[in-house]
Image: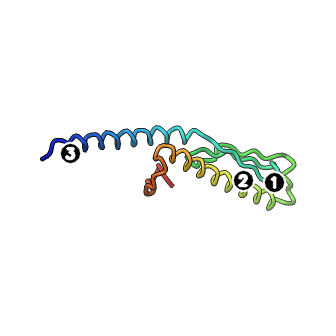
Amino acid sequence: MNLGNMGNMGKMMEMVQKMQQDMERLQEEIDEKTVEARAGGGAVRVIVNGAMEIVDIEIAPEAVDPDDVEMLRDLIIAAVNEGMRAAREMVQEEMEQITGGLNLPNIPGITG
């Protein structure tokens, strides 16, 4: 067995371990980052974090019309959907910084 190949294998394993550690650290950082989405001209505002959790929802008093609950529901759905889309985009951009744009398969909890 060629000992030079073993050295290369060891370096590769170190690189893989470092990338894994970087990805775990980045995932923790991403989970803490937030994005904001608005609907209805700002009548509904939603904050979503990188863990795809809704952190906050603000509803302007003028958006609350007891005679038109459907409109409020639609505004909330629109803001939440936009917030989730923006959070996914943020996560993808952050992950590309670590992976260097590598086309990695979906890794549960890390990618998509």
Residue 94 in percent (x, y) is at 54, 44
Labelled pair 1, 2 in contact (Cβ < 8 Å): yes
In the image, is residue 73 above or below residue 30? below
Is 27 placed left or right of 41 in the picture?
left
Identity, as a three-letter code, of the amino acid under mark 3 = Asn
Colour pattern of the rendering: rainbow
Disc 1 to disc 2, how far (Cα)?
A: 9 Å
Disc 1 to disc 3, how far (Cα)?
A: 61 Å
Q: Which mark is residue 95?
A: none
Disc 2 to disc 3, how far (Cα)?
A: 54 Å
Identify the residue under disc 2: 79
Residue 80 in percent (x, y) is at 68, 53
**What is the crowding at mark 3: few (fewer than 14 residues within 10 Å), some, or many (at least 20)?**
few
User: What's the residue at 63%, 53% (across, down)?
Assistant: 84
Q: Nearer the viewer, mark 2 or mark 3?
A: 3
Labelled pair 2, 3 in contact (Cβ < 8 Å): no
Identity, as a three-letter code, of the amino acid under mark 1 = Gly
Identify the residue under disc 1: 40
Identify the residue under disc 3: 5
Q: Quadrant of residue 3?
A: top left
Is 75 placed left or right of 34 in the picture?
right
